Amino acid sequence: MGTWDAKHRQEHGGGATPTSAASFRNLCRSSPWKWQSLRFEYTETPGSGTVRAWLRRPGALRLESGDGTLLGSTTGINDSRDGLYISATRKSWLLPAHLVTPVYDDGGLVRRRPEAAYGEPSFGNGRFAAALDPVELAGNAPVPLEFPNANAVEVLEPVQQVTHEGRPALETVVSPNPGYRPLDPAAPLCGPGRTRIRVDAGTGVCVAAEPVDGEGQLPGHRIRILAVDEYMLDDLFVAEPMNLTDVREHIQWPLRPNPA
């Protein structure tokens, strides 16, 4: 755990993550402030192979198959912003989420998200990005009153503390309400009917979504987190490493014949 995170937990409550429905929703809002880099394995269900991923916010992603084959690599470290800023849209001037301060609850989780430049790199469909920041399950802020069906999703079972791949997580069963707006309507984290959702307590990542209805035919996913906030070099996110010349090797210099 980093120094800032330890200090933050002391200032905002620390300890075990509370298990109320409100705390579950606040955890779903917290991902942008809980980590900057993540190494993990991602599997979509049913019938999908495992993908290994390295992600460094705000936009660097490397993907490999189980046998180490490079599937994709993208990074914004060398992109020019000229066209973006010339467009003069308000969105182009938003700061990354980790540079702005949200409203925290007493447990150190995010109760209200500020306006910021949100968004995660995507792979295949929007479920991948939504799982990394599952705010679609909670909305940016609490609803004014706890009217029935006012939240994005309805929490149907008591929130429980569980262990997922050796890490603490919160788990419950949810169903979509009329106001549910998934990041990708074709690949929502919460499908029709009931879905068992598991959110990692340390990162706010939705590490498992398992449809309870649909007899195993509806899509879901599982994530195994391997490392949080590892240092990741730029070379990791490019197809061809930007290696300098190895001066330990003999360098041949072509010699031209003397002019006549």
Image: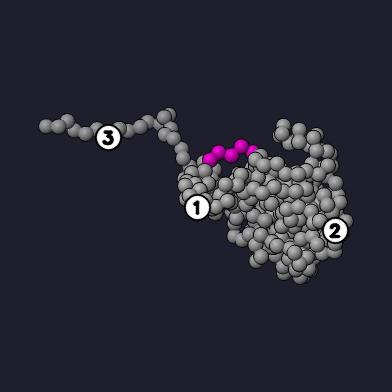
Q: Which mark sits nearer the N-terminus, 3 or 2?
A: 2
Q: Residue at x 83, y 59 (%)?
A: 155
Residue 146 image offset from top left, x and y in percent: 85, 58
Q: Whole-percent x and y of residue 206? A: 73, 53
Task: Point out residue 42 in the picture as x, y percentages from the top left corner.
Answer: 66, 54
Q: Assign a secondary structure to mark 1.
A: loop
Visible residue check, residue 84: no
Q: Which residue is mark 3?
A: 254
Would residue 184 be counted in the magenta stretch?
A: no
* Identity, as a three-letter code, of the amino acid under mark 1: Ser
Magenta extent: 230-234
Residue at image position (53%, 46%) is 76
Q: In the shown orientation, is residue 186 left or right of residue 16?
A: left
Instruction: Inspect this view and state whether residue 11 appears.
Output: yes
Q: Is residue 53 above or below residue 260?
A: below
Task: Check disc 3 and report its element: helix, strand or loop.
Answer: loop
**Can you give x and y, in whole percent of width and height, for residue 218 in the image?**
72, 67
- 3 or 2: mark nearer the eye: 2
Which quarter of the figure is the C terminus placed in?
A: top left
Predominant secondary structure in magenta?
Answer: loop
Nearest the eye: 137 or 210: 137
Residue 254 vertical position relative to residue 133 in the rendered view, above or below:
above
- Which of labels 3 and 1 is toward the front? 1
What is the spatial separation of the Cα atoms under label 2 and label 1, in whole angstroms? 40 Å
- The residue tagged 2 is 146
Q: Which residue is mark 1?
A: 87
- Res 21 quadrant in image: bottom right
Q: Nearer the viewer, residue 76 or 53?
A: 76
